[in-house]
Structures are given as C-alpha cells and as structure tokens.
Amino acid sequence: TEIDGQLAEDEGLPVTSGVLIRGDDVSGQPGVIAGGPADKAGLRDGDILVAIDGKPIDATHQLDVALLGHEPGDVIDLTVRRGNRTIHKEVTLGVRPADTLQ
C-alpha cells in the first residue's frame, strides 16, 4: 500500500511516504506470501519500503516504476523501516507467485 500523509496519520506510521507491506483484509491474504520473494528476502507484514538502491519510494518515485529497470535475479538494496528502526536488506528479485498477480 502506497503511503501518503493521510495513511501515515491514520495508521500512526513513522514516515509519510514509501510502501507499507500489509495483507488484504477482504481476502485474508498476507502481504508477504510464504515462500515468495519477499519472504525469502526476510521482509514482513508491517515493514515499510522507503528506498531502492538509495532512491526514495514516494509519490514521484513509485515502487513499480523503480523496479522497471530490474529483472528477476537482479540484486537490489532495500531501505526498510521496521518499527522505529531503519534497516538495509540486500534482496535478489524473484517472480511474484501467479496467484497474486493483478
């Protein structure tokens, strides 16, 4: 879920931009699929992706656009907010499981 000022305020998030990993309340599907690329990278529901390779993820620099120049197998550096900490994760991109494509 893309974060904007309103979502950040409503959810009490520590940042006002980025992408919040969370599941779908309607389907009950988690944001991080067991065995999927995000799970293998150590990401969790509730993590906030704030940058890829040092470039911020925000309304101007969206996640899907930032990933356009990459392919499965590429290694990227993700900056992630987890609670009150900022962590870096080196992630090898994979392929999204077919049942989650929309």
Image (spheres, helix red, strand yellow):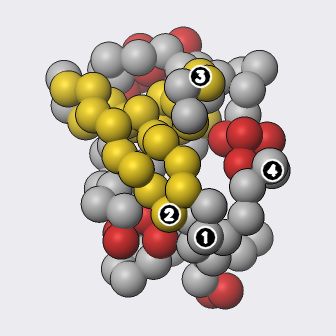
**Quadrant placement of the C terminus:** bottom right
Q: For marks 3 and 2, give the CA distance.
A: 19 Å
Q: Nearer the viewer, residue 102 or 6?
A: 102
Indicate which label's residue lies in the foreground, 1 or 4: 1
Q: Nearer the viewer, mark 3 or mark 2?
A: 2
Mark 2 element type = strand
Q: Which residue is mark 1?
A: 73
Give the x, y percent position of residue 83.
20, 31
Residue at position x 41%, y 17% in the image: 15
Q: In terms of secondary structure, where does tag 3 sit? A: strand
Gap in angstroms between the C-alphas marked 1 and 3: 22 Å
Q: Amino acid at mark 3?
A: Pro
Instruction: Identify the residue at image location x=79%, y=41%.
Output: 65
Q: Which residue is mark 2?
A: 92
Residue identified by numbered label 3? 56
Circle 4 residues within 10 Å: few <14, some 14–19, many ≥20:
few
Question: What residue type is disc 4 on?
Answer: Leu
Above or below, 52 against 85 in this view is below
Q: Is residue 75 above or below residue 8?
A: below
Residue 77 coordinates in the image, percent (x, y): 47, 42
Between disc 1 and disc 4, whose residue precedes? Answer: 4
